[in-house]
């Protein structure tokens, strides 16, 4: 058994064959957490999970890129569609998160890739994202749910925020980890898991994977993105998680079955999957 802890079957890219993809995954004993990036995709993730008695779960949250700060123009993702929000509606998201199929708040975090050019606007832009993250962390704490963190070009700021949080009330995973070992150690020391996906075929993360304890690793696809080269098709899907597990097994010089067993245990423990 494998658990794809970060999929996006709830977006436009899977509109035409979503049920067929899920059927193939469940037949291959792959469980899936579909990740929200705004209210619309979060709601869709909950609706999809509700159709399946076992194996399909949902995450809800507002991705930092989907917050319209008015300071940058972000290119619309054709695979996802355009769903920007001016602010985080705490009560609306809370109501959605109370659904029993919701096992985590995410993906939320910080993303400084698309940012203003002037220093003053840049700082205001960063603060808007930090404020958004703070509100969503409060939601996670209130509902006693873990968090899936997105972080791009913002590791130092995220670490500062998490070091100031109550570790007894906050746990989760750093999705698609691409930082260095010094950063990884800080997240691990704070009690977080590291999530690895098809990016490990593009970037050299071997030493980080070797050094990260196996009981702190989660596997994911981030599908339809980051397709493993062995999948044999352009669009990624949760079946690609097998190749991520195989690559981690190779890097750690352990058997595939052990990677599958322990990462599945990790996912079930963190997300309380039944």
Image (tube, rainbow, N blue to C red):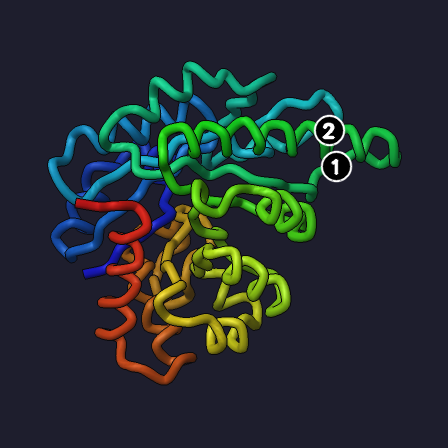
The residue carrying mark 2 is 72
Query: Residue 210, relative to residue 158: is it above or below?
Result: below
Horizontal and vertical percent position of residue 205: 54, 71
Horizontal and vertical percent position of residue 103: 30, 38
Closer to the camera in the image, 132 or 71:
132
- Residue at x-position 53% and y-position 45%: 150
Q: Residues within 10 Å of mark 1 (few under 14, many from 20)?
A: some
Q: Secondary structure at mark 2?
A: loop
Horizontal and vertical percent position of residue 37: 46, 32
Q: Is residue 170 left or right of residue 59?
A: right
Horizontal and vertical percent position of residue 101: 24, 32
- Residue at x-position 36% and y-position 59%: 219
Closer to the camera in the image, 157 or 87:
157
- Residue at x-position 20% and y-position 51%: 25
- Residue at x-position 25% and y-position 52%: 268
Q: Secondary structure at mark 1?
A: loop
Q: Mark 1 and mark 2 in contact (Cβ < 8 Å)?
A: yes
Q: Is residue 20 left or right of residue 112?
A: left
Query: Residue 161, relative to residue 191: is it above or below?
Result: above
Q: Which mark is residue 36?
A: none
The part of the image, by quadrant, that contains residue 259 is bottom left
Which quadrant, please, contains the N terminus? Answer: bottom left
Which residue appears farthest toward the bottom when viewing the image?
Answer: 253
Q: Residues within 10 Å of mark 2 (few under 14, many from 20)?
A: some
Query: Residue 116, relative to residue 160: is it above or below?
Result: above
Which quadrant, please, contains the C terminus? Answer: top left
Closer to the camera in the image, 154 or 21:
154
- Sequence order check, earlier mark of 2 and 1: 2
The part of the image, by quadrant, that contains residue 215 is bottom left
The residue carrying mark 1 is 115
């Amino acid at each position: 058994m494998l658990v794809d802890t970060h999929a996006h079957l709830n977006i436009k890219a899977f509109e035409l064959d979503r049920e067929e993809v899920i059927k193939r995954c469940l037949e291959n004993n792959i469980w899936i957490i579909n990740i929200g990036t705004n209210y619309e995709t979060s709601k869709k993730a909950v609706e999809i999970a509700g159709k399946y008695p076992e194996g399909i779960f949902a995450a809800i949250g507002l991705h930092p890129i989907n917050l319209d700060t008015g300071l940058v123009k972000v290119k619309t993702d054709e695979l996802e569609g355009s769903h920007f929000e001016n602010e985080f509606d705490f009560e609306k998201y809370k109501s959605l998160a109370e659904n029993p199929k919701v096992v985590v708040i995410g993906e939320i975090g910080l993303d400084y890739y698309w940012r203003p050019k002037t220093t003053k606007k840049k700082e205001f832009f960063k603060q808007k994202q930090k404020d958004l993250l703070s509100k969503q962390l409060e939601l996670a704490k209130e509902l006693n749910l873990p968090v899936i963190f997105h972080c791009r070009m913002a590791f130092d700021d995220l670490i500062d925020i998490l070091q100031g949080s109550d570790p007894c009330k906050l746990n989760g995973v750093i999705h698609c980890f691409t930082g260095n070992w010094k950063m990884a150690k800080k997240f691990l020391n704070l009690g977080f898991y590291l999530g690895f996906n098809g990016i490990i075929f593009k970037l050299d993360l071997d030493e980080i994977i070797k050094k990260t304890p196996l009981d702190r690793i989660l596997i994911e696809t981030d599908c339809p993105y980051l397709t493993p080269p062995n999948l044999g098709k352009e669009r990624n899907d949760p079946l690609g998680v097998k190749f991520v597990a195989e690559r981690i097994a190779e890097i750690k010089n352990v058997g595939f079955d052990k990677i599958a067993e322990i990462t599945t245990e990790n996912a079930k423990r963190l997300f309380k999957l039944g």
